[in-house]
Amino acid sequence: MTVISILSDLVEEPRRFLEGGDAPGTGKAGLAGFLFGALGLFAFLRLFSAVPPGLYSFLNVLIAVLGINFALAAAMHLFLGMTGCAGSAPRLFSMLGVTELLWCALIPLGFLARLELLSPVAAFVLCLAGLLSARTLLVRRLYSVSLNKAALAVGLPYAAVLAGAFTLLLYALVCLVWLFA
């Protein structure tokens, strides 16, 4: 099966595709999704000069996307495994790659933001919301869990990162007050 046929099967009949066994080529579709999603994210960041141009910068974005999604897949699978849900971590990682294709929507939204018809933050948040909802529905189908448990599995890693960032910010603020007081 080619990457295009796997993606078309996923779009046309998602229930049958996700509940079926491991289809050959699913890993290729996931890696292609990671590649094109990172390309869309890189193009969006390049539109606003947030990253330097070049292959090295794109490879850094791709490695960051792969690393973050690997950690997210591990955390989601761990949480769902601890709650007694059966599923496949490699299949979850590949399907997270397929959902990464939604970052490609940032390119036209970035052009709209460059024309000042849309805020860049609004474009990013819009794509992020679509990505999170797609991942929630994906986890719900892959692990046969309720929508609430799937939303919790997807949201907990993001909440942990936000809590860590808030703690670091608070610590930095306390250090600055202590340093200059």
Image (cartoon, grey):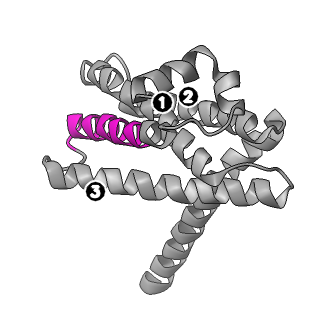
Q: Residue at x 48, y 43 (%)?
A: 27
Residue type indicated by callout 3: Asn
**Label 2: how many Cα within 10 Å (few below 14, some 14–19, many 20+):** some
* Residue picked out by circle 1: 127
Task: Point out the tag, 3 or 2, that comes first from the N-terminus.
Answer: 3
* Residue picked out by circle 2: 130
**Mark 3 vs mark 2, CA separation in Å:** 24 Å
> Is residue 119 visible from the viewing direction of this image?
no
Image x and y of residue 178, in percent: 50, 84
- In the structure shown, which secondary structural element does the residue marked by tag 2 occupy? helix
Residue type indicated by callout 1: Cys
Judge from the rendering whether residue 20 lies leftward or rightward of residue 51; answer left or right.
right
- In the structure shown, which secondary structural element does the residue marked by tag 1 occupy? helix
**The N terminus lies in which quarter of the figure?**
top left
| Residues tagged 3 and 2 counted as in contact (Cβ below 8 A) | no
* Residue picked out by circle 3: 60
Q: Nearer the viewer, residue 39 or 173?
A: 39
Q: Is residue 119 shown above or below 31?
A: above
To which quarter of the image does residue 176 belong? bottom left
Q: Is residue 149 shown above or below 7?
A: below
Which stretch is magenta? Answer: 31-49
